[in-house]
């Protein structure tokens, strides 16, 4: 789907889950080929001519970086993507087997019909514009701003655009109930900076041409003039919008408002029509996120000519639906979103795109599948066949060890008062572990899927999912809910103080039961520590042991935390992954804090696991060295330049090379393990190293 929907879905999901990583895919090795040599580190990947303190990323993976080229159908290649590729091959087998099932009342039958509907390109091409005729007719028939506002509300289950994003999540100050959150939206480019910064002028020109191209395919009148007007409309919205860094402030983005006051405080927009279109006509209270931006966006909407709003809606419907439409639309979508913005040379194979359409993903790359999919249904099939039950016990044991290590570290903190420490330890004790797949199945019995209607399938699944969100508003909070599907190659820490490890994630190189313990602690152990730390990062620390938004810090402790975090942010802001593009230390703060905390906690847990013993030396590497190499090789990756430029603007995670280098230069044991000395590029004097958790 288009980026305007992607941005909102990701921001709202942060309320319930702090994401760790978003992998891509590369050609698969043989299904059962080992990812590593027996003890877990790929020695052939290393470049030992590089001093570890000059560039530990290259020391651990430089030979691999030199011999690896980007695949044509991806903007980044990484070791983790071999894991994703294995998942995709498994999903392909599952979906193709399901496609033989003709009974669409069963889960397998629905999944198979959805898959067939996207793979039938001859039928899709023959349909042309027909699948979106209804939306286009409704847009042409809209005779007022109010009518357009109602269509915006219907965007929850259709391809329309909206200047506001809306969704339900746990109320941060009443964690026993759900609330409706409303935030800024309306942008088709990846971020407001793309509209406002001189460095993105080329992308703006390409976007205007893309708008005109889609409007031309729709036979919309005055395509050139309307494309310019649409871009100008979105540019004004971008100028009024908050930055991504500002959106990370969970206090500033929590602003409860009675529904009756929407028209007064956010005047200029038809809120009644909008909420009715979204099926929320009875809602009496909402939570406004970017409080100062929303009235400015309403004013822009009020003063924009109706003809421009119609053209914007028509273009966005085509943009959102393009991947499911005839070849001219799909090609235009790929050439702009994936090729021009991210540098991807060729589309992914149709079967792999079909997996994303049916099973969903984190909406990267060509950004299909983040709206209207059967991800949890596919996850049920995947888990039943591929998830090893023993992995649940192994991960729960590791989490217990990591939690004990974090408790010990909190108890030893010299900068934290006893009052804050008690609260922190109480919060740590509430964490629960979710491994593999949800305890409760998603019920798709009421969902209608047809093998010859991919656009309708996407609409119906999106409407089904939104209907679940609306219906749960009056009921209790489901603490068993997952924000990732079981086949996802990722992990997260949620508002329920839950650490979630989907089945797809628990494979090499992140977790390999046969690997050296030092390597596993450097890989999955750091991930566990990372997720634990998210509950105490610059955003997570604002939630208490119940998950409520409450300040449980003394003023002195809060000031000390902010000071230490600011020092870490300054370190990352100095990193320049490509010329002219620096890491945004504020945007990436939470992930950087979690990376640093994860390493420190996992290293202590590894040392605790040795008991009174001493780690053996393997192939000349000590236990600590293998720990740090395990961490570095998990993050091995080679992105294209356009991908990196996009990442530093849009992604709350630092680029991979700095997820290796950035935290390690603040860890004393790394200096000892690799004899890092003054004069090495990334050396920091002991008093300059940031120590928090």
Image (cartoon, rainbow, N blue to C red):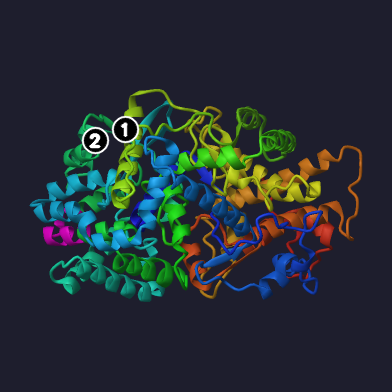
Image disc number at residue 470: 1
Q: Is residue 486 above or below residue 74?
A: above
Q: Which range is magenta? A: 301-313
Q: Residues within 10 Å of mark 2 (few under 14, many from 20)?
A: some
Evaluate whether residue 66 shows in this view.
Answer: yes
**Magenta stretch contains residue 308:** yes
Q: Where in the figure is residue 121, as x and y percent of width and height?
A: 34, 61
Quarter residue 383 falls in: top right
**Magenta stretch contains residue 499:** no
Q: Earlier in the sequence, mark 2 or mark 1?
A: 2
**Foreground residue among 631 and 270:** 631
**Foreground residue among 325 and 167:** 325
Q: Where in the figure is residue 416, as x and y percent of width and height?
A: 66, 37
The structure residue drawn at horizontal position 48% and vertical position 32%, both measured from the top left corner, is 481
Q: Where in the figure is residue 467, as x and y percent of width and height?
A: 31, 35
Image side of residue 633 versus residue 9, left or right: right
Q: Which residue is mark 2?
A: 279
Q: Are marks 2 and 1 in contact (CB under 8 Å)?
A: yes
Q: Residues within 10 Å of mark 1 (few under 14, many from 20)?
A: some
Secondary element at tag 2: loop
Estimate the spatial distance between the alpha carbons at disc 2 and disc 1, rounded to whole Å: 7 Å
Q: Is residue 185 above or below residue 211?
A: above
């Amino acid at each position: 789907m288009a980026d305007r929907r992607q941005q909102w879905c990701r921001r709202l999901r942060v309320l319930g889950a702090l994401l760790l990583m978003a992998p891509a895919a590369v050609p698969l090795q043989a299904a059962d080929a080992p990812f590593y040599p027996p003890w877990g580190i790929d020695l052939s990947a290393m470049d030992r001519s590089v001093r570890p303190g000059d560039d530990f990323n290259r020391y651990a993976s430089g030979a691999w970086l030199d011999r690896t080229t980007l695949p044509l159908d991806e903007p980044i290649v990484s070791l983790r993507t071999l894991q994703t590729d294995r998942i995709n091959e498994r999903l392909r087998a599952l979906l193709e087997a399901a496609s033989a099932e003709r009974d669409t009342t069963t889960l397998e039958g629905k999944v198979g019909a959805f898959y067939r509907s996207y793979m039938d390109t001859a039928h899709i091409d023959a349909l042309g514009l027909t699948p979106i005729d209804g939306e286009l007719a409704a847009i042409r028939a809209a005779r007022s701003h109010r009518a357009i506002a109602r269509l915006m509300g219907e965007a929850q289950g259709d391809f329309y655009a909206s200047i506001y994003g809306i969704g339900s999540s746990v109320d941060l100050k009443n964690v026993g109930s759900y609330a409706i959150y409303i935030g800024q939206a309306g942008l088709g480019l990846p971020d407001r900076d793309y509209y406002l910064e001189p460095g993105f002028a080329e992308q703006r020109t390409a976007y205007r041409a893309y708008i005109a191209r889609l409007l031309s395919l729709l036979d919309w009148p005055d395509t050139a003039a309307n494309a310019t007007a649409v871009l100008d409309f979105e540019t004004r919205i971008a100028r009024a919008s908050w930055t991504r860094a500002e959106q990370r402030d969970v206090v500033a983005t929590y602003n409860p408002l009675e529904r009756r006051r929407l028209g007064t405080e956010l005047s200029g927009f038809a809120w009644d029509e909008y909420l009715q279109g979204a099926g929320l006509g009875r809602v009496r209270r909402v939570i406004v996120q970017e409080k100062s931006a929303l009235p400015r966006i309403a004013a822009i909407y009020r003063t924009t000519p109706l003809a421009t709003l119609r053209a914007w809606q028509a273009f966005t419907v085509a943009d959102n639906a393009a991947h499911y439409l005839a070849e001219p639309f799909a090609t235009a979508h790929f050439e702009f979103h994936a090729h021009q913005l991210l540098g991807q040379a060729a589309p992914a194979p149709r079967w792999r795109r079909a997996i994303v359409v049916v099973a969903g993903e984190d909406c990267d790359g060509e950004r299909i599948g983040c709206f209207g999919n059967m991800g949890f249904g596919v996850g049920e099939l995947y888990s039943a066949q591929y998830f090893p039950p023993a992995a649940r016990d192994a991960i729960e044991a590791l989490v217990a060890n990591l939690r004990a290590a974090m408790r010990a570290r909190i108890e030893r903190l010299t900068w934290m008062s006893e009052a804050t420490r008690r609260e922190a330890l109480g919060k740590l004790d509430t964490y629960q572990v979710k491994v593999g797949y949800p305890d409760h199945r998603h019920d798709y019995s009421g969902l209608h899927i047809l093998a010859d209607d991919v656009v309708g399938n996407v609409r119906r699944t999106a409407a089904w999912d939104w209907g679940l969100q609306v219906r749960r508003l009056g009921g209790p909070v489901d603490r068993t809910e997952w924000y990732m599907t079981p086949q996802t190659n990722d992990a997260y820490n949620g508002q329920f103080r839950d650490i979630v490890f989907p089945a797809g994630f628990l494979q090499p190189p992140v977790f390999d039961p046969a690997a050296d313990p030092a390597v596993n602690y450097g890989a999955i152990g750091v991930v566990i520590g990372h997720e634990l730390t998210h509950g105490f990062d610059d955003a997570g620390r604002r939630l208490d042991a119940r998950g409520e938004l409450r300040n449980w810090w003394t003023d002195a402790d809060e000031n000390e935390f902010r000071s230490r975090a600011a020092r870490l942010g300054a370190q990352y802001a100095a990193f320049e992954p490509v010329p002219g593009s620096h890491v945004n230390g504020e945007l990436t703060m939470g992930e950087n804090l979690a990376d640093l905390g994860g390493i420190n906690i996992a290293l202590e847990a590894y040392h605790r696991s040795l008991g009174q013993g001493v780690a053996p030396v393997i192939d000349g590497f000590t236990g600590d060295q293998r720990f740090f190499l395990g961490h570095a090789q998990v993050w091995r990756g080679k992105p294209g330049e356009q991908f990196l430029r996009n990442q530093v603007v849009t992604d709350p995670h630092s680029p991979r090379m700095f997820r290796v280098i950035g935290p390690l230069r603040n860890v004393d044991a790394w200096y000892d393990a690799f004899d890092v000395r003054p004069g090495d590029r990334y050396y920091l004097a002991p008093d300059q190293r940031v120590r928090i958790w």
